[in-house]
Image (tube, rainbow, N blue to C red):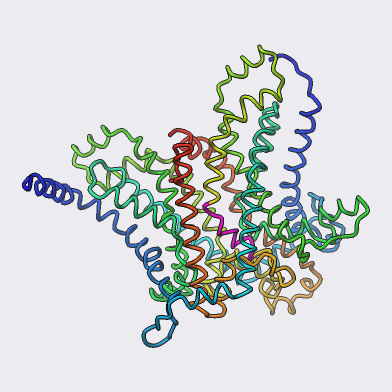
Amino acid sequence: METAHSGKIQKKLKSMKKDRILYLILLPTLIYFAIFNVWPIFEMKLAFFDYRIKGDDIYVGLKYFKQLFSTPTFIQVLNNTLIISTMKIILYFPLPVIFALMINEVRLGPGRKAIQIISYLPHFLSWVVIASVWFQILSPTGGIINHIVALFGGQPIDFLTSKSAIRWVLFASETWRSIGWDSIIFFAAIMNIDASLYEAADIDGASRFQKTLAITLPALITPMITVLILNVGFFMNAGLDQVLNFTNAAVNSKIDIIDTFVYRIGLQNSQYSFATAANLFKGVVGTILIVGTHLTSKKLTGKGAW
Amino acid sequence: MAHRKFSLAQLIIILILCTSALFMLVPILNIFAQSFSDPGLVNKLQGYDILPKGFSLINYKVILSNDIVWRSISNSIFITVVGVTFNILLTSSTAYVLTRHGLVGKKVIMYFLIIVMIFEPGIVQEYFVMKHIGLMDNLWAMVIYKSVNVYYLIILMRFFEDVPESLIEAATIDGAGHMSILFKIMIPLSKIPLLTVGMFYGVFRWNEFFKSSVYLSSKKNTVLQVLLRQFVINSDSQVLVGASNLFANNAIAKLDNGSLKAATIVIAMVPILMIYPVILKHYTSGVLSGGVKE
């Protein structure tokens, strides 16, 4: 028993020695992650300490977490994050599915292709560019949307400074950017459906709508669950880049999210410990969500998030 | 196929799809139209116009005569090109090692990478790390930043696993080492997935703006997206035209601010539009089929 065990270890050591060049090749990547991912995680202990420029930081326990939850701004920020994520994950969720189903209904090859090519493009533009384009779309002077508003006899609306509209601007621009690209996975699933199923339904005299309900939609259940679960893992994010580009003084209280809060408090106001506490809270909840959804997904579809 | 009339439902669907496609395309073309419009006629341009009013290159001339703009373009190109080279080298070598059979500790390393993928480093902590290693206000900070995307690594590993083992064995018998197997067998045989992954890395790097604005604070290290943001979002037009330019050139004073912004947006979009056809061509055969395959 003893010798068998040590024999195994020896075999492993021998194999590691043989593969030493492989480990050497791997080293730069491991060093990279150690510096940029592992080190910062350890540094997050700052949430429990008072930051001092000179000398050791002072342990303060949960002081900053207590402060966090008694700060009205943070409650507002948490609230905003959850609302915006609900809109961009739950409310948005059926849209790419519907988009894929509609594209599937276009029987004209070139027309379908043109729509696909156009709809994937916004996904590749930066949020700076998208925000710039949307500033034009929503412009009170000559923007497309206000042309339509004027067509119905309305007064021009400045959506970007409207507290009640700004979250919908985030939702709309996110949809504009992602609906085409996100529909790919559903469209691919539709393409994979066995054509003989539709032929059999034709013989039974099923209508187009009936076929969609009975054949196409069921084939989309698995990718739908996978996508939904994957996105729930990002619930605490809500889109830092997007918010930074769309925000302004008039509406910031409506779209200030955890990430923008951490950035502002931490890097602009140098309240390092307080910002770290907020960030750690977000990180822990986010990790629980990702691991939780991964396990749920594995159970439901046999496919996890990784 | 039997001839079939369009039903009402189908007509509505086509109408909805065409409207959404136009809603994506027209605003982008509108920006192009604005940037090429004649400064005297641009006020006639409406949000739905896709052709310029008159034609003029003056907006581009003004913008490209500003040193800061050239500086930011070359910085963006440097970060993108060197960064993607870094990405490809690290991702492919890591994928190669992690697809070797019988590598001791493979599972531990994979778990490590997945944990690292899940838990994002804090904004403040990452900033501290950059400061500690002395990369503040250094273009290399943005080159090294996000060197390996674990998601792309896993995609690449799927393709490397498909390379026939016999090829690698034959090369080993011929005395090839790991490096030459990686560069002479694995990479040439995985050209398309590597190209696809490389393009996704490239798009990410070209479009990145938040971390660039945090880590590259001085003017000489500004990247194009940050400059664009200052100009378009914060409406800081001096940034773009340059204070000296603004007063020295009488013609510029008459220029429309919106058109100058439009020209800058176009410049930021051009590289993306250039590689977009390549992405379209290979994505369906590359990542998509790789994802469906399993």
Which is more toward the observer, B48 or B119? B119
The single residue placed furthest to the left in the displayed view is A3
Q: Is residue A239 magenta?
A: yes
Q: Which residue is more in the foreground, B114 or B222?
A: B114
Q: Position of residue B244 (x, y in %)?
A: 69, 79
**Side (left or right) of B210 relative to B108:** right
In which image quadrant can residue B73 be found?
A: bottom right
Image location (x, y in percent) of residue B27: 75, 52
Extreme-top residue of the structure: A203
Quadrant in the rendering for residue A60: bottom left
Q: Is residue B53 visible?
A: no
A181 vs A12, left or right, is right
Q: Which residues are magenta?
A: A233-244
Counting from the top left corner in percent of width and height, residue A70 is at 58, 75
Q: How many labels, in total?
A: 0
Q: Left or right of A219: which side holds B83?
A: left
Q: Is residue B65 magenta?
A: no
Which of the image's four quarters has the N terminus of chain A? top left
Q: Name the residue nearer the viewer: B245 or A300.
A: A300
From this view, report whether residue B211 is shown above or below residue B273: below
Quarter of the view holding residue B269: bottom right
Above or below, comparing residue B216 to residue B40 in the picture: below
When the figure is inspected, residue B233 is found, relative to residue A298, above or below; the finding is below
Image x and y of residue A264, in percent: 58, 74
Q: Tell me if I can see residue A71 in this picture.
A: yes
Residue at the far right in the pictured view: A153
Residue depicted at x 48% and y 34%: B292
* B146 displayed left or right of A28: right
Task: Tell me which residue sits at (66%, 27%) in the image.
Answer: A213
